Amino acid sequence: MLCSYLRPSLPHILPLRLLSSAASRVAAVKQHELLSDTLAFEDPRAFKVKSLGELLRALGVFRLCSFPALVNNCGKLMSVARTLLGKRGFSLLLRPTVYAQFVAGENEAEISQSMQKMSLQGMRPMLAVPIEEDLGESTGEKRYDDNMDTMLECVRMSHSNAWSKDPMMQLKITALLSPELCVKLTNIIRQQPYDLNLLIRSMDGEPISFPGLDEKEAAHLRSGLLRLNKIAEASVNKVRVLVDAEYTYMNPALSLVAMAMMKKFNKDGTWIWNTYQCYLKDSRSLLLDALSLSKNECFCLGVKLVRGAYMDKERKLAMKEGHQDPIHQSWEDTNDSYNGCLDLMLDVISQEPERYRIIVATHNEESVRRAVKRMEELGIDRDGGSVCFGQLLGMCDHVSLTLAKEGYSVYKSVPYGSVDETLPYLVRRAQENRTVLQGIRKERDLLRKELNRRLRLSLRGGS
């Protein structure tokens, strides 16, 4: 009798439940509307965390980047400036300007200072060793061994510092393996696919012979795989290693190596990742193949999703060799490709977040908003680790800072090294991303608004 007295009858409880459900829906709608307003990325107060010097530097550098002639010819111009000014004078010119905007520093003390500041702003570092090679630039085994040591030091630095929270680092396989071999390997596996276990056995030190390669080439591949294995062993359970995609004439070989590393090291977590370039017409099929392979081979898959940066070179090469252009014909097609791959990964992550991860590596605000909206719809945690966002150091801070403020995981790709070491890297990135550099008017406008806000406060005696 007492229980029946305490338990409300169903007609009384239904209205309460309906009201509660309606209230929850209204609250969710309001929260979504507030988030949508915030993620318009129109608020210059995102830059409140930046010093006056940082605002002025960014405005100056971005103004220079808005001139196509400067960006297109930056390599030649910097070479002339270096000749005229000398090494020391050139360094004095670049260090407080372009270098300070896009590079974290030269030594660990400088890098740590930059990273601590980034950490206080809610962002995480993804260190990038500025080493890569293209055809005709191969430097020999000694240089590749030196590059491995540099990357092992990057693993150590990423893991051992207080600013490191779930740290990432970028890795270019062509810093450890010659581009010429990667091209030949690509041509071989298009005709005769390699078993992943063949590469894994080589990583474990077996003297494997590889079909289609002569002994010298096989020896170099074995050495490269051993180098990659050392880096992976050092990083597992410490640092997530994101393998960069490069050119289509070598990407299949790079992906083969990345997948072999995933099969060996991603059994219980996502430590090795691969990159998918959505400006390529076959990007979705490549991603589907990777998802299928990870399921069949029982390893976790990490995906770095980018639009792509080698469009001009890829198109010129396709025209020169009479091949079909591998790049989507329009910006809209590339956007559709990116958003389709993004939706695919988010759907998979919502079902098995412990097995799949993605970094939404883009400066495109619409893609960021789309990812955020789908995360809400699918119930994916903002800071759960399965989905994070990535932008380049020194660029797109109005997006990065806003996302971090809203509780999302945000990484900045952070090159480091001396002026001489990072200059070729910066020149290549500038030329590859010139459409992005020339399209940063909105960020410049927001920086200018924040600067004007501070000047008005100063004139009124505010702080």
Image (tube, helix red, strand yellow):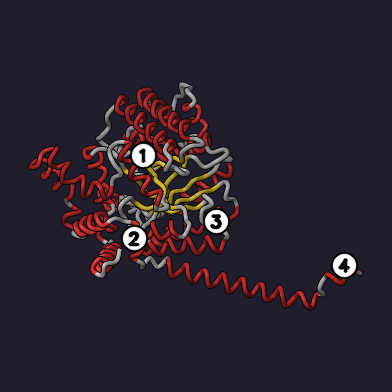
Q: Looking at the image, tell me whether mark 4 or mark 1 is earlier in sequence order.
A: 4
Query: Considering the numbered disc 1 on the image, is that residue within a helix, a strand or a loop?
Result: loop
Quadrant of residue 89 within the rendered picture: top left
Q: Looking at the image, tell me whether mark 2 or mark 3 is earlier in sequence order.
A: 2
Q: Looking at the image, tell me whether mark 2 or mark 1 is earlier in sequence order.
A: 2
Q: Residue furthest left?
A: 84
How many neighbours does mark 3 have within 10 angstroms: few (below 14), some (14-19), or many (20 or more)? some
Q: Label 4, label 3: how many angstroms apart (C-alpha)?
A: 39 Å
Residue drawn at 89 percent across, 68 percent down: 2
Location of mark 3 (residue): 381
Location of mark 1 (residue): 172
Query: Considering the numbered disc 2 on the image, is that residue within a helix, a strand or a loop?
Result: helix
Of residues 293 and 57, the one nearer the viewer is 57
Location of mark 4 (residue): 3
How many neighbours does mark 4 have within 10 angstroms: few (below 14), some (14-19), or many (20 or more)? few
Q: Quadrant of the N terminus?
A: bottom right
Q: Residue furthest front?
A: 461
